[in-house]
Image (cartoon, grey):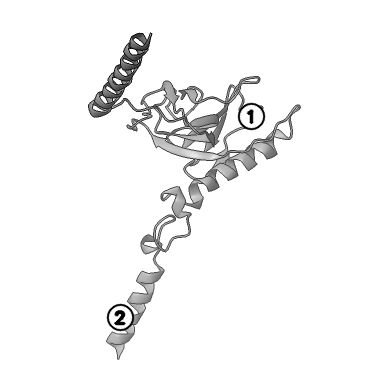
Amino acid sequence: MKSMIKIAFLSAALMASPALAAKDGEPGGGGNPNQGGGGGGNAPTLSSPCVSVFGGGCNFNGIINSVDDANLTASLYNAANDAFTPNTDITLNFLAKLEAGATGTNPLGTGQSGVFTNPAWLIDFWAVKAGNQFRLFGRSVGETSSSTVNWTTLGLTVGGGNQPNMSHIVFFGREVSVPPVDPIPEPATWAMMVGGFGLVGGVARRRIKASVSLA
């Protein structure tokens, strides 16, 4: 009987142990699964008062991976920006998160700065992540939405005094329809086209000869 009581006590203690509890972002945890394991503990917070994201950018601590992160970031910025005049509220329409060195049709580079282009997007804002900090940028005043972004980690303070390397970038804006590129005709198609032109030319020559004969 005492052995059974000991086993029951030890089982209860192990289940209550923090070390074995599910972590945020893991199955059974309390985090948002869209945040890739970031959880509530790494939710975005404004690093310091910031006048404007337009042009210079504003620093935030935490993660920026998902739509929820983007909405919280915009809310934090808008609330803090109310103290400044003029102030402009922002809306972050999530497009995609790209890791450093991402390949494909529209690759993303690595390092401390670079240029990214995606003709299918009109990008209004972008968040450059390094370490546990990210910097949110918006188009300069008077600049229109564009498919191209000149990104940089300049201004982030997680490099121990050195400019850090980018870990990923999240883009915000809207998608645009790109006109399809006309395909190059295949050899068989070219042959049919040439044959068709030849047939038309032959018919035209016969008509000319017939007109000359009647005259």
Q: CA distance from mark 2 to mark 1?
A: 57 Å
Q: Nearer the viewer, residue 11 or 153?
A: 153
User: Residue flagged by tag 2: what amino acid is it?
Assistant: Ile
Residue 1, image x, y percentages: 30, 91
Question: In this figure, what is the number of numbered marks?
Answer: 2
Is residue 82 depicted above or below 143 in this figure?
Answer: below
Which of pointers 2 and 1 lies earlier in the amino acid sequence? 2
In-front residue for pair 177/163? 177
Q: Element under label 2? A: helix
What residue is at 38 percent from the left and 29 percent from the top?
Answer: 106
Whether residue 14 can be seen here: yes
The residue pinned by badge 2 equals 7
Q: Is residue 34 above or below residue 81?
A: below
- Label 1: which secondary element: loop
Choose top left, top right, bottom left or bottom right for residue 52.
Answer: top right
Residue lying farthest to the bottom in this orientation: 1
Compared across the picture, whether 36 is left or right of 49 comes to left
- Residue type, mark 1 in image: Cys
- Residue 77 point in image, percent of width and height: 64, 37
Residue closer to the observer: 10 or 39: 39
> Which residue was labeled with disc 1?
50
Evaluate whether residue 163 shows in this view: no
With 161 as the anchor, is 173 left or right in this view? right
142, 87: nearer the viewer: 142
> Do labels 2 and 1 touch, CB within 8 Å?
no
State whether residue 67 is above or below residue 18.
above
Few, some or many residues within 10 Å of mark 1 (<14, 14–19, 20+): some
Residue pictured at 48% horizontal, 59% vertical: 30
- Closer to the eye: label 2 or 1: 1
Q: Quadrant of residue 103?
A: top left
Q: Position of residue 211 (x, y in %)?
A: 37, 12
Q: Residue at x 75, y 27 (%)?
A: 86
